Image (cartoon, helix red, strand yellow):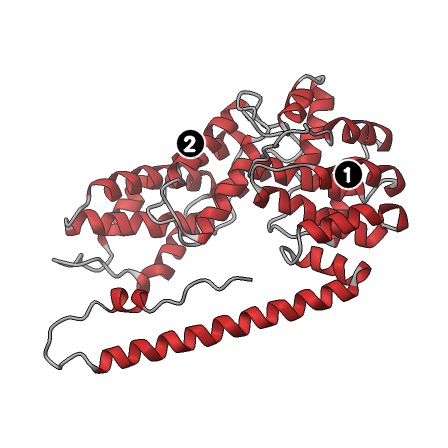
Amino acid sequence: MVLDRWNAFVQTLPAKPVSGRPDLAGEVERFREFVKQTPDSERIPLLLHAYSGYRERSSSCGTDPAQRFESSCYSILISTILESKIRPTQDEAVAILRKSYHQCGHGSDVEPPLALAQRAYRNHAYSDDLFDAVAAYYETLRPTRSTTASNVKRKLKWVLWHDPRRVEKSCCTRHMQHAIHAMPAPQAFAWQWLLRNTAPGLNSSPGKGWLKEGKKRLSPIGEGEFLLRLDQWFTFAEAKTTLSPAGSAMLRLLVWYASLVDVHRSLPILVRFTRVSWVKRNPALKVVAALAWLLRQHGGSEFQEDINLICREWPGESAEVNRLQETYFPAEAAARRQADQELSARRKRELDISREAMLEALKTVPLGSGTIDIVRLMSSFRPAEPSK
């Protein structure tokens, strides 16, 4: 029934162009009205049908106007159904994730498939079916390079960190994963639920909403058990240590949760992180920044050596490290700011000189000399990276 209504609706749309891409922007409100009139029970089956049709048409349409037209229709239908506040069951959410498809990874329809699944699994442990659907959606988004798609891929990796079949191969958090997967089911879910309280961004400090929710999720575990596990998990090898992006998100969460217990007991454990030698610094920086926030809030003279180490090894690499340095080493912070300002001014001067040189070079090009390779010309005058 719903497919018949959809096919009839498509026939009422403006005729598809003979060449070029169809412009259906003016028809979006009609799509919304169509979805509004579609019963709730039929919207998810229609969405799954739209994903299949969109994937098929997008991968084979080429220059065929009819295929492009149908692809655009399915794309708009997907977006309008997703914005209609559907509430899928767990099985339906898994099916939506598995079916989801995007050509470029832009737009407001990239994140909803994951958000719908997380809502469906709220207060429930993730299932293998969900993990497999998340992995499939990640593969769908893998070729895309948009900022939106990159953010969603990062969140998909956070979900997959909990999959017992996909334990990290070299990340130092693999012993956390093994420990959680070996726990009895209720205890394992308590820890999974704790570490699913991820923040949408990569901030160094938790917001009020996160802290409120964090207290609720920490309560079933208890302070004693949390500190015991923290002591076990913040133990690192003396050799070069690997930390994956997903692993860094989990360790950052533990730092945030450590602010909700006795910090006089949690901070001595956490500062071990400052003495680790990392294979790659960038993932570790997220945890260092969170630790810098906690030290700025609750540190003291007993952590002077650790604070000094962070400010010496990670100067200017995060706003929170900068704030920590401002608090404990104001003279060094002032010198860093001065150096940063001088570096910025020097880069601006060199860029201005490069632009002037490029403009002078353009003046020497005779009129009517043909197409100028502007990109190559600009790159030839790009200033060298100044030394700090």
| Image disc number at residue 136 | 2
Image location (x, y in percent) of residue 66: 17, 49
| Image disc number at residue 270 | 1
Q: Quadrant of the C terminus?
A: bottom right
Rounded to the nearest whole Å, what is the CA distance between mark 2 and mark 1? 35 Å
Query: Which residue is at 40% across, 35% downward?
Result: 139
**In the displayed structure, would residue 368 be above or below residue 40?**
below
Residue type of the residue flagged with mark 2: Ala
Residue type of the residue flagged with mark 1: Leu
Instruction: Report the front residue among 343 and 122.
Output: 343
286 vs 371, left or right, is right
212 vs 93, left or right, is right
Foreground: disc 2 or disc 1: 1
- Judge whether residue 255 can be spotted in this image: yes
Exactly how many numbered labels are in the figure? 2
Query: Which residue is at 28% across, 52% downward?
Result: 72
Task: Write down the quadrant of residue 257 in the picture.
Answer: top right
Task: Write down the quadrant of residue 326 in the picture.
Answer: bottom right
| Image disc number at residue 116 | none
